[in-house]
Image: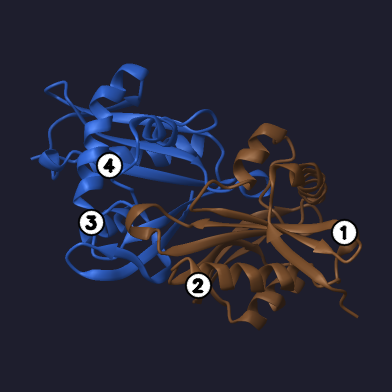
Chain colours: A blue, B brown
Amino acid sequence: MLAFMLVRAATAADWAAIWPILEEVGAEGETLTWDPQTTEARAWAGWMREPPGRTVVAVGDDGQIIGSANTYPNHSGPGAHVANAGFVVHPARRHEGAGRALCRHVLDQARADGYRAMQFNAVVETNTAAIRLWQSFGFQILATVPEGFRHPVHGYVGLHIMYMIL
Amino acid sequence: MLAFMLVRAATAADWAAIWPILEEVGAEGETLTWDPQTTEARAWAGWMREPPGRTVVAVGDDGQIIGSANTYPNHSGPGAHVANAGFVVHPARRHEGAGRALCRHVLDQARADGYRAMQFNAVVETNTAAIRLWQSFGFQILATVPEGFRHPVHGYVGLHIMYMIL
C-alpha cells in the first residue's frame, strides 16, 4: 500500500537529508553514474540546481525525506527545450511510491516550464524497476550505450538513453 | 590543401583566442548547444576542463589558434570509462583540417587515458560536414533525439548521439 507522498521544492535545509541518500545510493554503485569520492560541496552544486533547474524532495507521511529529484535543460541554448532529470530514493524506503510521485511531479513541472520533451542519459539496464517505472509514464528507450556502466555485480552493462515527448 | 596543424594542450593564455571562437560559433547557433548569453567565466569553466578532463588547441602554420577541443568523462563514477568530447573551429578557418586534426588527437589521447569508448551527445543532424568527419573516424549514430535542436534556419532538427569503441 502506498502512503501519502508530498513532493515539494527542496530548500537549503533539506540538504542534510538529501546528502546521505546520495552518498548511500552512490556507494551501492548499481544505479547512479555517481563517483563515491564526490565531495559534499560538489554534490550540492550538482544536485541543488539553480534556475531554470529545479530540485524537489518527496516527503513521507512520517515527515521524513524519502527521495529527491532534479530537472534542468539537458543541453544549453538551442538544445534547452529538452529537459533532463535525476532521481534518488533512500535505499531503506524503496517500494513506497517515492519514485513514482517524484516522476509525476517532475513531468508536470517540466510541461509547465515549457519543455517539449524529457531525456534520461544514463538509465542502467539492470535497474529494471526504474525502467518499468519510466516506461509506465511513457518513456521509451531511444538507444543503449553498450557497456556504458560498470556494475559491481554484473560487470559492464548497458546505459539506456530514455526519451518522452511532453 | 591542408596546412600543417599542431594540436597541443591549451594553456590559460590560449583562452584569449578560444573565447572569441566559442562566442562566434555559439552566436551562429547552428552547430553547438551553446547559450549565447553564456558569461565568459562560465564559458571558461565549461571549456577549460580540470583533470581528468583535457583541453587542447589546434594551431595553424601561421601560429594562430584555429580551433579547440576538450575531453572528459561523459558520466561520473561507474560511467567514467566513456569519454565525451567537444570541438569548435573558427568560422573563418574551416576546411583547413583543424577538426580532423583535433579529432585524431582527442581519440589517441582518450585511448592513452584508458577510456573504452567515446560518445558525442549532441551532433546537430544538419551539420553534415561534422557527421561525415566523425563517421570517417569510425563513429556511428547510436540514436537521434527527435527535434532536439532548434536551428535558426531549419527549425527543430534532430540531435545525433554518436558513439565509437576506442
Residue A17, given in percent of the width and then of the height, sits at 23, 26
Q: CA distance from mark 4 to mark 3?
A: 12 Å
Q: Which residue is mark 2?
A: B111
Question: Disc 4 or disc 1, which is closer to the eye?
Answer: 1
Residues at discs 2 and 1 both on one chain: yes
Tag 3: Cα neighbours inside 10 Å, few (<14), some, or many (≥20)? Answer: some
Secondary structure beneath disc 1? loop
Q: Quadrant of the N terminus of chain B?
A: bottom right
> Label 4 sits on what residue type?
Val
- Quarter where residue B63 is shown: bottom right
Which of discs 1 and 3 lies nearer the camera? The answer is: 1
List x then y, in percent, for residue B27: 80, 46
Q: Residue at x 34, y 52 (%)?
A: A137
Q: Which residue is mark 3?
A: A30
**Front-lying residue, B64 or B88:** B64
| Chain letter of the residue beneath label 4 in the structure image | A
Q: Using the image, tell me which numbered label, if any, was put on residue B63.
A: 1
Label 2, residues with CA under 10 Å away: few <14, some 14-19, many ≥20: some
Give the Cα separation between the discs numbered 1 and 3: 48 Å
Of badges 3 and 2, nearer the viewer stands: 2
Furthest residue in direction top, as rendered: A13
Q: Quadrant of residue A154?
A: bottom left
Pointers 4 and 3 in contact (C-beta within 8 Å) = no
**Chain under label 1?**
B
Q: Can I make out residue A1 in this image? A: yes
